[in-house]
Image (spheres, rainbow, N blue to C red):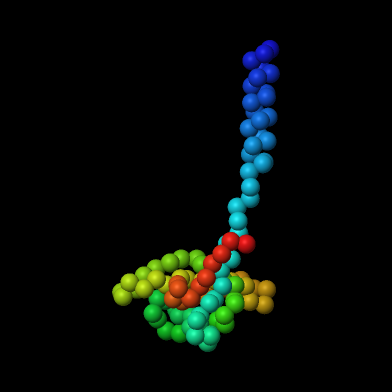
Amino acid sequence: MKKQFASLVLIASASVLTFASPAKAEQVCQVTDPTGTPLNVRNYPNGEIVNALRNGREVEILEIANDEQGRAWARIAGYYEGEYRVWGWVIREFISCYNR
């Protein structure tokens, strides 16, 4: 009986610890082009321009890749007028991310 009680206490303690752990911080990324002009969005790293996004636009980074010159590019997506869109590729250094 004591072993069963000890096992129940151990299980109950473990479940309390599971629920007490802090939530993971949500990462937010935004367009931050230092030139102040809209950031060119391309169909692939260093490819054809297909769109442009203004500074402050919240985006999600889906993927990172390097071009032949070693520059990091980010494939980005986000919401526009309530619709989720995959925009394309931008130079990674023009996207700033932080935890909310």
Furthest residue toward top = 1
Specify whether residue 89 is in view. Answer: no
Q: What is the x, y in percent for residue 39?
A: 50, 82
Image quadrant for the N terminus?
A: top right
Furthest residue toward bottom = 37
Q: In this view, does 81 lie to the left or right of 31?
A: right
Q: In this view, does 24 lie to the left or right of 43?
A: right
Q: What is the x, y in percent for residue 3?
A: 64, 15
Furthest residue toward front = 34
Front residue of this view, candidates 7 and 77: 7
Q: What is the x, y in percent for residue 70?
A: 33, 72
Front residue of this view, candidates 21 and 51: 21
99 vs 37: above or below? above
Query: Would you identify the image quadrant in which residue 11 lies?
Result: top right
Image quadrant for the C terminus?
A: bottom right
Specify whether residue 33 is in view. Answer: yes
**Image point 54% across, 67% down: which residue?**
97
**Image point 40% across, 76% down: which residue?**
45
Front residue of this view, candidates 96 and 8: 96
Query: Would you identify the image quadrant in which residue 2 lies?
Result: top right
Q: What is the x, y in percent for residue 10?
A: 64, 26
**Image point 52% across, 70% down: which residue?**
96
Furthest residue toward left = 68
Give the number of callouts.
Answer: 0
